[in-house]
Image (cartoon, grey):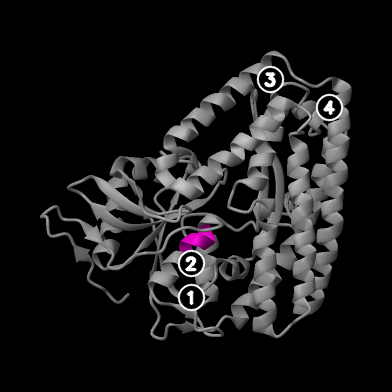
Amino acid sequence: MKKRQAARSTDGGGALLVPGYQQFGGRQAEAGALRNVLAHSGIVAAHTGEPFTEALLFGIGGGIGLGYFVYESGDFTSLFVATRITTTENAQTGFPLTICQRLGLVATMQTASTAPAAEKKLKQALAEGYPVIVWVDPRILPYYGPPGTYHTLVVYGFDEGKKEIYIADRYDGALTLTPEELTAARKGEGAIKFRALVIAPPATKRVDVKKAVQEGLGDFCAQMREGFGPANFKSNFGLKALEKWADLLTEPKDKRGWSRLFPRGPRLFQALTTAYDQIENRGSGGSAFRELYADFLVEAGEILKQPKLNAVADQFRDSARLWSALSAALLPDSIPPFKETKQLATKKRTLFEKKGAAARDETQAINARLAEIKSQVEKAFPMSEAEVQDLLADLRQRALAIHAVEEKAAEALQALVR
């Protein structure tokens, strides 16, 4: 990897700052972080001569997906609804690395077993002038972190004297963390400990994307139709996962059905809130990233000279509207505490996107109000058993409607990429 000298502060504090770094924000954490690093490095798409769009990178990685599963441990039960394609996630692989490999970029995955070793590698990369993509547990961040299992941000500076680390996240501006805050987030339960990605600018900075786009489209089609993982687990992903979720919403005899796992009361409220948050607030725009994927398909159509991909993009925009309607129905407006909960959950995200760390006090106030609502719902659940069954039946029909649209879209896409 060719070394580039990082700028150092002149105050004697030993600050390491990547020269000229000015790339911030993002619609989806991983694709956004990668877009920011590539744009800073001057790497452009050959077909436009412009920096990569976030949508294009997202689609090259495989784009959207669907996963459904429930984790149980004793009295604890948690729901997980995946909204991007599921990839193998361990110390040496991950969604951004897949994108880099498909683009032919030289990307080095950093790993470490201890916090001091991880910090040393981070400083080395910064000293050579490279911004670093790091994986963190978003729940551990001192500002709003989206409800995603894998979250990335960009580190572009480290000032030991001030005890500040300069980062770029989904907010369109600079943020800082203390070294202790970053370390805590990097070793959180929801992240691969101390995993980071460093990308070396290629010899030619105009990168051809045609093959990468085809591979991303192929991955999406394969996972939606075939699932992911071992045979006994495949039905938890792709189109079959939507059918599974729909069936379990109203199946009273299955031990995995919602009437057993999430009976009327606090556990049901938590499941509904979790599903809403994961669909709407993992990134800007909500709708399970379907709008972002539609944007990719439009760009893919231009790259592959396949104008019919525009029609498939429209199908996914239809799907996006159905996802939004489903998420709204999870917490009905007719029930005041449910309506307020979903409004506050999304307000936390939008406040962060607009204000960054300056939204911290408002976010804390929202969290306090959400805790109050949760307590109220636990004491007096605002739905009868009959109303709960009607809600679950409605959600089932909405999930099946999404399945019907996305099944047709996946079939149309498969026919175009053969």
SS at mark 2 in the image: helix
Residue 35 - label: 2
Q: Position of residue 286 (x, y in %)?
A: 65, 51
**Marked residue nearer the N-terminal end (2 or 3):** 2
Residue range (magenta): 30-34
Q: Position of residue 305 (x, y in %)?
A: 70, 85
Residue 377 - label: 3
SS at mark 4 in the image: helix
How far separated are the C-alphas under marks 1 and 2?
8 Å
Q: Nearer the viewer, residue 80 or 363?
A: 363
Label 3 packing within 10 angstroms: few (<14), some (14-19), many (20+): some
Give the residue at the far top of this rendering.
379
SS at mark 1 in the image: loop
Query: Does residue 234 appear to the left or right of 179 in the view shown?
Result: right
Which residue corresponds to mark 1? 51
Q: Is residue 170 above or below residue 147?
A: below
How far separated are the C-alphas under marks 2 and 4?
43 Å
How far separated are the C-alphas under marks 1 and 3?
48 Å
Q: Label 3 amino acid?
A: Val
SS at mark 3 in the image: helix
Which residue corresponds to mark 4? 388
**Marked residue nearer the N-terminal end (4 or 1):** 1
Q: Quadrant of the N terminus?
A: bottom left
- For image coordinates 69% across by 71% down, the residue present is 297
Q: Quadrant of the C terminus?
A: bottom right
Q: Is residue 79 visible?
A: no
How far separated are the C-alphas under marks 3 and 4?
14 Å
**Marked residue nearer the N-terminal end (3 or 4):** 3
Q: Is residue 184 above or below residue 56?
A: above
- For image coordinates 56% across by 69% down, the residue present is 57
Q: Is residue 184 visible?
A: yes
